[in-house]
Image: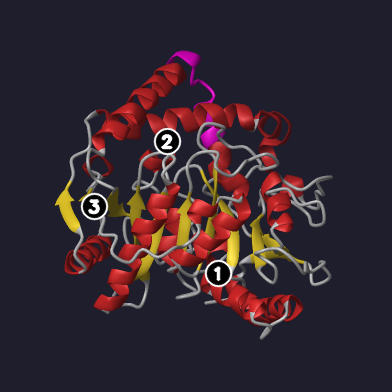
Amino acid sequence: MLSVIDIARRIDQGALSPHDAIRRSFDAIASRDGDVNAFVHVDRGVAVRESGPLRGIAVGIKDIIDTADMPTEMGAAIYAGWRPKADASVVAMLRRAGATSVGKTATTSFAYLDPAATRNPHNLNHTPGGSSSGSAAAVAAGMVPLSVGTQTGGSVIRPASYCGVAAIKPSFRLIPTVGVKCFSWTLDTLGLFAASVSDVAFALAALTDRSDLRPGDDAGTVPRIGVVMQDFAGEPEPDSAAALETAVRAIEKAGASVRAARLPAILGEAFAAHATVQDYEAVRALSWEYDRHRDALPPLIARLLEAAQPLGAEAYDAARSTAHRARGALHEGFGDFDAYLTFSSPGAAPETLASTGDSRFNRLWTLMGVPCVNIPGFTNASGLPVGVQVVTRFGQDARALSVARFVEAALARAR
């Protein structure tokens, strides 16, 4: 995989030019994407920026995010060829930081469950996850060092786990969603994929102009970690259980304080409330598409919108109230833990291209709006990656990244 930090360092040293770095990504896309199908549009004529902390960094943009110079098609036939007049805020922010948007990455239709054509680079018969399918796969296949995705349920952390890359779903609204196709205004969150946690931190700091997010010297910082099983979400598969056990052993050996953590009971209620919030808002966010183009919608999104039509304001308000109370309980529930460690996905990527997998270990954290980081480092007997997830309090993105770097380093030493 390509490293954001390594490319930036080589450019700073004069060993690589921004144009050559971008050209190498275009060459990698041409060589590898015929099998992976991570991109739905590539623009080799895009202008390369010469300044900024992300100069020379090729970025894939999930195709529900507006780009003025490329189509934004939502993974849906009814938006084929649609050209926005303006960039989404996140695209404009990337350009200001010097990054070069080289293409649009495949998304499930409207970022729901109808799969894109993308395949998992580790085994082309397996799903890469979704809905940010192409964004995860493009980084995993070494085509780009950085990509942008979105998460409403588990659409950043789960594909990162399946594809073996680092990713962050930051605190809610840390990155503005202006210009991103809305599915649920309470849940939709932009996130980043890169090769390592440090690469993700470097890119997020540059994108948001927040120096506290930059990867720093974590030497001597020993986190207090609570292990959360998320019993309300069901049992993990053996591969995810093994990934979490491996991570726990590694961080204990590295000196971290590790204890089992119990979540307040209302967190289980909030987990169940996620679907009500999501579905009620999706009906309204996609009302034009449903009312005017119902027959052209792919089957899974059409079925969801049909089934969710009767959801009323009373149920929605009750779900939002549960979420609000759960956020307060979660903040207090961390106690003296610096972070929670939990599953990123139920298991390794399923052997199917007809499904993107299950987001059950991600939905609660999305509803809570807290930062989550996927840490790669475990591989099952079939050679498929499985990640683990670090979660911290709302607004503590710098801490989430620091703890995730600790876990990543511990796993690397344990191999």
Discs 3, 1 touching: Cβ within 8 Å: no
| Range drawn in magenta | 304-314
Q: Position of residue 263 (x, y in %)?
A: 22, 37
The C terminus - image quarter: bottom left
Disc 2: which residue: 367
User: Which residue is rendered at x = 50% and y = 42% of the image?
Assistant: 152
Amino acid type shown at disc 3: Ile
User: Which residue is rendered at x = 26% and y = 28% of the image?
Assistant: 266
Disc 1: which residue: 139
* Picture quadrant of residue 95: bottom right
Q: Residues within 10 Å of mark 1 (few under 14, many from 20)?
A: many
Amino acid type shown at disc 1: Val
Q: Residues within 10 Å of mark 2 (few under 14, many from 20)?
A: many
Q: Position of residue 271 (x, y in %)?
A: 34, 35
* Picture quadrant of residue 101: bottom right
Dominant secondary-structure state across the stretch colored magenta: helix
Q: Viewer-nearest of labels 2 and 3? A: 3
Task: Kindly report the distance in space between the C-alpha atoms of the residues bearing marks 2 and 3.
Answer: 22 Å
Q: In the rendered view, would you say 174 is above or below 159?
A: above
Disc 3: which residue: 225
Q: Earlier in the sequence, mark 2 or mark 3?
A: 3
Q: Position of residue 380 (x, y in %)?
A: 30, 73
Q: Give the image's coloring scheme.
A: secondary structure
Q: Which mark is residue 104?
A: none
**Is 309 inside the magenta-drawn segment?**
yes
User: Which residue is rendered at x = 47% and y = 42% of the image?
Assistant: 171
Disc 1 on helix, strand or loop? Answer: helix
Q: Earlier in the sequence, mark 2 or mark 1?
A: 1
Q: Tell me if 349 is positioned left or right of 265 in this view.
A: right
Amino acid type shown at disc 2: Leu
Q: Viewer-nearest of labels 3 and 1? A: 3
